[in-house]
């Protein structure tokens, strides 16, 4: 399969399609989860109003989750990322507050696991907010079925490539405070395509928009620490020497 776009306008079109694809793939599972938790919250909240009128708050949160979930499943947009982050904040705060309230009331029926879930939901909200800030500034276009199939095939081809045996493939791992990602890339004459470990995040880029700086070996193992700039992304990564050599040879070639 021919993947190279040689830095042409087609590269930009494919990136716009890839941005839309990423937002869609990120939001749809989140939307399904919001629908499920929304239904549960509606049933528990409005069903428990007689016992405690405050449960109506949970019911209204459930309505919000349900509407939010349906919206982002069928209309995945960057605005949906913003609304989904708000939903996660609200549910997370509720789970923490209700756990604290039950603890002060001497109740033992509400396990502390809900407070832990609440903290995770709030962290997820911040992550979703970060994605919104990044992707809301990026151009995106809804791909045709043919373009979507092409991008899916590109992602599968690169992820399944045998990196050590194919000289145009590179692999590196990025590390942030809360997550680690493995990226596979295919280097063409004047461009490159990078795919993350999930296959959801894809970057089509001309060679001129890729830079890297070697920072030295890591404390353990043979990998090398390096900083990368790929389009507008700044990454700190670890990479095997063989793949760094491929990057170097690719960047220096004409």
Image (cartoon, grey):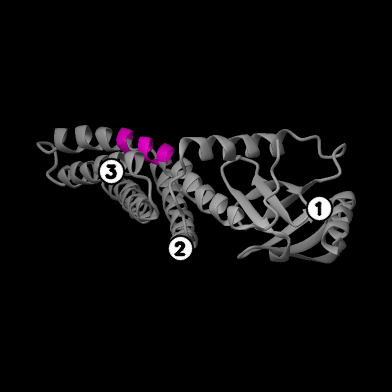
Residue 66 in sight:
yes
Which is nearer the N-term, disc 3 or disc 1? 3
Residue 12 point in image, percent of width and height: 57, 57
Q: Nearer the viewer, residue 214 or 209?
A: 209
- SS under mark 2: helix
- Answer with left or right where residue 22 lies relative to residue 68: right
Q: What span is in magenta? A: 28-36
- Answer with left or right where residue 143 lies relative to residue 246: left
Nearest to viewer (mark 3 / mark 2):
2
Residue under numbered circle 1: 239
| Identity of the residue drawn at 44% across and 51% down | 141
Image quarter where the N terminus lies is top right
Q: Give the spatial CA distance, label 1 vs label 2.
A: 28 Å
- Answer with left or right where residue 236 lies relative to residue 168: left
Name the quadrant containing residue 63.
top left
Q: Residues within 10 Å of mark 1 (few under 14, many from 20)?
A: many
Which is nearer the N-term, disc 1 or disc 2? 2
Callout 3 touching callout 1 (CB < 8 Å): no
Residue 59 point in image, percent of width and height: 19, 41
Which is nearer the N-term, disc 3 or disc 2? 3
Residue under numbered circle 3: 65
Q: Nearer the viewer, residue 113 or 211?
A: 211
Residue under numbered circle 2: 133
Callout 3 touching callout 2 (CB < 8 Å): no
Is residue 71 one of those drawn in magenta? Answer: no
Residue 107 point in image, percent of width and height: 29, 40
Residue 5 point in image, percent of width and height: 67, 51
Q: Nearer the viewer, residue 224 or 219?
A: 224
């Amino acid at each position: 399969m021919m993947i190279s776009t040689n830095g042409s306008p087609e590269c930009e079109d494919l990136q716009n399609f890839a941005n839309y694809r990423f937002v869609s793939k990120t939001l749809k599972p989140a939307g399904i989860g919001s629908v499920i938790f929304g239904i549960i919250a509606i049933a528990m909240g409005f069903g428990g109003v007689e016992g405690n009128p405050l449960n109506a708050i949970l019911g209204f949160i459930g309505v919000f989750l349900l509407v939010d979930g349906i919206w982002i499943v069928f209309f995945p947009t960057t605005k949906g990322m913003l609304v989904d982050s708000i939903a996660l904040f609200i549910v997370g705060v509720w789970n923490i507050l209700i756990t604290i309230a039950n603890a002060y009331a001497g109740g033992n029926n509400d396990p502390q696991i809900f407070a832990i879930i609440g903290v995770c939901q709030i962290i997820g909200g911040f992550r979703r907010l970060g994605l919104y800030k990044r992707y809301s500034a990026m151009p995106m276009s809804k791909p045709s079925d043919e373009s979507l199939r092409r991008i899916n095939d590109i992602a599968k081809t690169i992820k399944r490539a045998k990196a050590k045996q194919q000289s145009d493939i590179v692999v590196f791992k990025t590390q942030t405070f809360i997550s680690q990602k493995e990226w596979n890339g295919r280097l063409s004459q004047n461009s490159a395509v990078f795919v993350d470990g999930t296959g959801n995040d894809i970057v089509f880029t001309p060679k001129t928009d890729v830079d890297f700086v070697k920072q030295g070996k890591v404390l353990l193992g043979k990998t090398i620490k390096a900083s990368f700039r790929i389009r507008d992304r700044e990454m700190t990564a670890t990479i095997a020497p063989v793949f760094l050599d491929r990057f170097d040879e690719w960047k220096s070639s004409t």
